[in-house]
């Protein structure tokens, strides 16, 4: 088991993306138990500078959360998502699988093609199964890359309303169209929008 643990450690260390147990066992000699080796490896890395974390159905080596500040100089944020993109992403994350119609119903405005396309290109959302309803609309779900980026094991680990309000991330603003004089489509473009407009400088 000690040798299997070393193999799993080597694969996770060298991999740029989270690795599933099946992928581990495909690379290891026949008869190896990657799942058991992972259990020992995770215990061995407890309290260390890096740890073995679960991301969806896969595993990866990541910096310990309390040491993340040491890496901040390596990360430069040049652009941030527009409010439309953030809202669309949040709706998909909390309501997945979600159709375009469901996203539009929750937001109260139409969703531009550019917004969805950009989130797909970023690989933070992907197409899910088609809904068994008239027209069989396609659904959207968040990806493993999304979970990995935000340090989540699965979508159930997303913060709840209380946590979002406590962090000051929820605005107490009325839904679009409820204030006289303000148009409902106050921020969305038509389907011919340039995808670069999805980002704010």
Image (cartoon, rainbow, N blue to C red):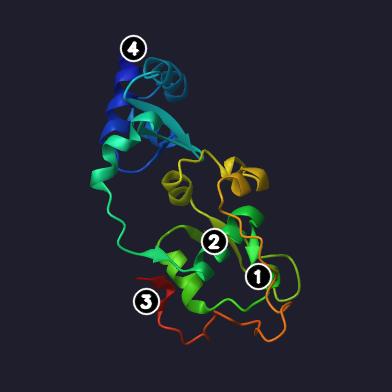
Is residue 6 found left or right of 162 in the rendered image?
left
Which quarter of the image is occupied by the N terminus? top left
First in sequence, mark 3 or 1: give its number: 1
Mark 3 lies on a secondary structure that is helix
Point out residue 119 in the picture as x, y percentages from the top left corner: 46, 65
Q: CA distance from mark 3 to mark 2?
A: 17 Å
**First of labels 3, 2 by sequence position:** 2
The part of the image, by quadrant, that contains residue 141 is bottom right
Residue at left offset 68%, top offset 87%: 181
| Disc 3 residue crowd, few under 14, some 14–19, many 20+, Cα 10 Å | few
Residue 148 in percent (x, y) is at 43, 44
Pointers 4 and 1 in contact (C-beta within 8 Å): no
Q: Residue furthest top?
A: 2
Query: Spatial distance from mark 4 to mark 2, Cα to Cα?
Result: 42 Å
According to the picture, the residue beneath numbered tag 3 turns out to be 196
Q: Residues within 10 Å of mark 4 (few under 14, many from 20)?
A: few
Residue 130's place in the image compared with 196, above or below, is above
Give the answer, above or below, for where 198 lies relative to 182: above
Name the residue that disc number 2 marks.
89
Q: Give SS at disc 2.
A: helix
């Amino acid at each position: 088991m000690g040798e299997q643990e070393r193999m799993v450690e080597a694969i996770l260390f060298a991999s740029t993306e989270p690795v599933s147990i099946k992928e581990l066992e495909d690379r290891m000699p026949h008869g190896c138990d990657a799942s058991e080796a992972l259990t020992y490896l995770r215990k061995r890395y407890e309290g260390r500078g890096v740890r073995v974390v679960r991301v969806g159905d896969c595993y990866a080596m990541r910096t310990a959360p309390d040491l993340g500040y040491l890496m901040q100089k390596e990360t430069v944020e040049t652009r941030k998502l527009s409010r439309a993109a953030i809202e669309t992403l949040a709706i998909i994350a909390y309501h997945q699988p979600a159709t375009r119609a469901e996203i539009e119903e929750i937001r109260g405005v139409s969703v531009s093609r550019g917004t969805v396309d950009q989130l797909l290109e970023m690989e933070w959302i992907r197409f899910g199964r088609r809904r068994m309803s008239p027209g069989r609309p396609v659904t959207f779900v968040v990806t493993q890359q999304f979970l990995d980026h935000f340090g989540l094991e699965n979508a159930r680990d997303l913060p709840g309303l209380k946590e979002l309000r406590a962090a000051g991330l929820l605005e107490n603003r009325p839904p679009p169209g409820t204030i006289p004089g303000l148009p409902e489509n106050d921020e969305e473009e038509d389907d011919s929008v340039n995808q670069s407009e999805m980002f704010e400088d």
